[in-house]
Image (tube, grey):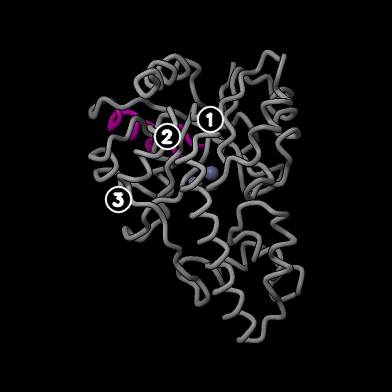
Amino acid sequence: MPVDLHVHTTASDGALSPSEVVRAGRNADLLALAITDHDTTAGLDEALRAADGGTMALLAGVELSVDEQSGSDVHVLGLLIDHHDAALAAALTGLREEREERAARMVAALAAAGHPIDLDSVREVARGGSMGRVHIARVLVGAGSVPSIDAAFRILIGRDAPFYSRKQTLDAVTAVATIHGAGGVAVLAHPGVSGEPALTALIEAGLDGIEAFHAEHTAPDRERFAALAAYHGLLVTGGSDFHGPGVHSAPIGGGGCPDSVLDALAERAGLYRS
Ligand SMILES: [Zn+2]
Ligand SMILES: [Zn+2]
């Protein structure tokens, strides 16, 4: 049965609520599903309630933004975390505050350049969730500045576009230690898409695994990252990075993750529990 260890909800930039994601996971006959929203665990209580009593295991997770000095987005998944851990919650609050400040900087620059948008509209689109560039993109589309989300990233707010602003994030050591402190397993997300330059620093910081089976990884990517994981004694995970039906992503369950990872994950998490 398929396993999907990387899924987003409306608590960050996904299109489905946590309950709807659980329903979609059940409809896809998943054996296990991890909800991994960007810099927030706000969707997990609802998801755990929705999954209660069913056969599909719901794993508590998070996708942390980590130091971007390498020039590409570095995302580290925390899987099997205690999402009520106080130190984790404090780190996530800091990351979300920085997301909001970064959004404010970008919106101010866009408005000064004549794009008719404001921060309140972005807040409204984010619905209280972890604020990201995709929410700014949706407002830009709604305001008629660009024809599509893709165009917003390409022309205005993508990493190489004029209105991009970097956000402060956690360094590798802090990110991995925070996940371990919450009893979770730290996994480098989608290195074939972004984040690979941070691999060495993350391994030195105590990284547990590599997401070799990501929906956007090619077959050679999967082989290469699985081999790298084996070489470094790391485990391998996988997920779809599902953001909602029709949203630039594979369907839920589409990461091609083997279910054998579940035992390896639980064993590894046992190292960080006392
Ligand atoms: Zn990511
Ligand atoms: Zn993701």
Mark before the other along the chain sequence, 1 or 3: 1
Q: The C terminus lies in which quarter of the figure?
A: top left
Q: Position of residue 45 (x, y in %)?
A: 66, 32
| In this picture, residue 61 sits left or right of residue 232 | right
Q: Label 2 is placed on what type of residue?
A: Glu
- Are the residues at dot 1 and dot 3 in contact (C-beta closer than 8 Å)? no
Magenta segment main secondary structure: helix
Give the numbered dot on residue 197: 3
**Residue occupied by mark 2:** 211
Residue at 49% x, 30% y: name it: 81
Q: Label 1 is placed on what type of residue?
A: Leu
Above or below — where is 191 with respect to 167? above
Residue at 44% x, 14% y: name it: 263
Q: Where is residue 53 in the image (x, y as percent from the top left)?
A: 72, 14
Residue at 37% x, 49% y: name it: 195
Q: Does the magenta stretch include residue 16?
A: no
Q: Quadrant of residue 175?
A: top left
- Are the residues at dot 2 and dot 1 in contact (C-beta closer than 8 Å)? yes
Is disc 3 surrounded by few (<14), some (14 to 19) or many (20+) residues within 10 Å?
Answer: some
Residue range (magenta): 211-230
Cα distance in 3D space between marks 2 and 1: 9 Å
**Residue occupied by mark 1:** 5
What element does badge 2 sit on?
strand
Cα distance in 3D space between marks 1 and 3: 22 Å
Is disc 2 surrounded by few (<14), some (14 to 19) or many (20+) residues within 10 Å?
Answer: many
| In this picture, residue 25 sits left or right of residue 60 | right
